[in-house]
Amino acid sequence: MSRRLCALIVTLAGAAGVVVPQTSAEDDVLLRAMRDELERSRQLRVVGGQDLPYFFSYSLTDSDSFRVAATMGAPVNAGHTRFRAPTVEVRVGNYDFDNTGHIFSGLYTGSRYDLDTWPLDDHYEMFRQCLWLATDRAYKTALESMSRKRAALNNVAATSEKLADFSPADPVKSIAQVTRKKIDEAAWTSRVLKLSSVFNAYPEVLASEVEFQAIDGVTYLVNSEGEAIRYGDSLAWLYAKAEGQAPDGMPLRGAASFQALGLEKLAPETEIRRAFTDLAETIRALAHAPAGAAFSGPTLFEPQAAAQLFAHLLGDNLRVPRKPLAEPGRPVNFVASEVETKIGSRILPDWMDVTDDPTQASWRGKALAGYYTFDLEGVPPKAARAVEKGILKSFVTTRQPTKGFASSNGHARLPGRYGAHLAAIGNLFVNTSQAMPLADLKKRLVEMCRERGKPYGMLVRKLDYPFSAGPSELQTLASSGAQSGGSVRPVSPPILVYRVYEDGREELVRGLRFRGVSTRSLRDIVAASQETALFDFVNNAALLAMPGMGGFLAPSAIVAPALLFDEIEFELPQDQLPKLPVVPPPNAAR
């Protein structure tokens, strides 16, 4: 399932209100134009050239979106957008060797006349014209990319490992009947304004914002292999962020979000209001909590925090992108998976399994955000048994082969770089064959601390994931993580972290972040709980899934138990703290 966004708008969707039936396959002008122009493009031949096109793909998402943002009960932004965003792909060469996989694959230096967004009217001739121009540009781009790739190969030492550039896939024909819906914009604007006023009762919250984004869309895809699909493509998202400042100047923050594949599946307003109230209470509690101190020892992640940890620590590493070809000495902006070379090795305890299954639509009566019917390459997803008895067995894959995995399991969910798509998890399930009640897990945490002479252990209840701070803080976090020997990707810091004393008392502390945590840390899990939690979020390929930073959306869900670690290291950053406001806020004088 693809959810395409404008570069400056993170659109999310769902709809309620007027229902507009979608036309049949025979009456769908857009689908007919795509099929007809594809048939003409397949007959394209090059005179005097060696690089013939072997693969064409036309895809388009027709989206109707609405966005409203508010703070303290007042609107700050609202707008409705309708757009049709196409993607035209042409590959030259053959499945074994084509124009992708070079550092400059996809770069075109010539003039272009095709449109980034298409006309909104159902005009057959105009659609054909748009497709013709886009195909022409995509083909010329492919030829340029192929030339660069061949030139680079002349300067690169040959390797024994030769992987194909693209894998064949069985074509699917699935033209679903889709209904288009119109959202009640006035009702949702009023709802968002009321929800944003929740934070008004908390003077510790210095800044807050609530944002609702919605899109109701239809995605089309046809290709030269015979693929022809049409399906509904909708998502709803409600996001709140709150910020404050401790008496010593330390910034405080937190966020809460709800997402669903359609507005009718979004959580009820009472649950949303309760979560936003809890967020405000979190800022208040952090403002009165002491700053943490460096610590290394037993740590318990409650189910939600454990699911968040798995989402970015393992979930991001289950995709294995191929490093692009480049000329010797040219730097390549590329981050490899931390477990790419670990197939057949233990990465978890032998009583843990991990499976990614996007075909599962619900869990214990709750809809799963990571469910989808087709990926961006038109491949139906398959369950990927990633870890069995602690041993890494497989990855989530696309149609770009990787070492040991020649075909796709339908996880091409995000646009990638260098002419390839990027894999992403759907519904990640963490299962255990041995577990204990969460209360007993906390007792074991205390016992481990007593045995080691630790004055307390640590309990993590919530991480800052998706990351709610700004890009500058993310850069600092990434730099500190690399220096401490942790993950090459930044690891989300804890928002709610507590000291647990021998008598079971919990003390909230603030300001801590992890040190040296990476996928290697997962081998230090010593126990898990019987209780599990469902955590879902909107993946956008940005570091730590930072909202607003990506152009495509891949909703994902993680189900995981609480995890007790033998040792996790925390540190208190020695950053210079910002100054407090010079005068109190206006409402303080009332």
Image (cartoon, rainbow, N blue to C red):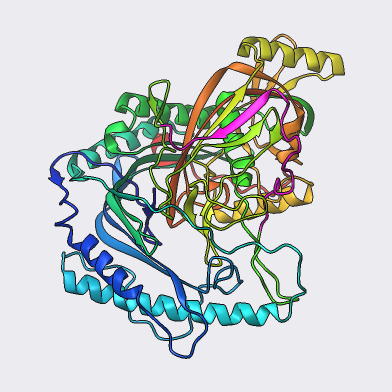
Above or below, 101 relative to 145: above
Q: Who's the residue at 32% across and 34% down the image?
A: 195
Range covered by the magenta-colored residues: 335-360
Residue situated in front as seen by the camera: 155 or 403:
403
Count how many numbered circles sit on residues in the image. Answer: 0
Residue situated in front as seen by the camera: 476 or 525:
525
- Residue 250 visible? The answer is no
Instruction: Assess whether residue 374 is covered by the magenta stretch.
Output: no
Residue situated in front as seen by the camera: 333 or 396:
396
Tell me which corner region of the image, top left, top right, bottom left or bottom right, holds residue 580. top right
38 horizontally vs 296: left or right: left
Q: Residue 35 in the image: x percent, y percent?
A: 27, 64
Q: Residue 429 in the image: x percent, y percent?
A: 54, 30
585 horizontally vs 320: left or right: left
Q: Residue 351 in the image: x percent, y percent?
A: 69, 22
232 horizontally vs 445: left or right: left
159 horizontally vs 214: left or right: right
Tell me which corner region of the image, top left, top right, bottom left or bottom right, holds residue 520. top right
Main SS class of the magenta portion in the image: loop
Q: Residue 191 in the image: x percent, y percent?
A: 26, 36
Above or below, 441 relative to 95: above
- Residue 179 visible? The answer is yes
Q: Who's the residue at 43% across and 55% down the image?
A: 377
- Which residue is at the far bottom? 48
Instruction: Assess whether residue 347 is covered by the magenta stretch.
Output: yes
* Quadrant holding the C terminus: top left
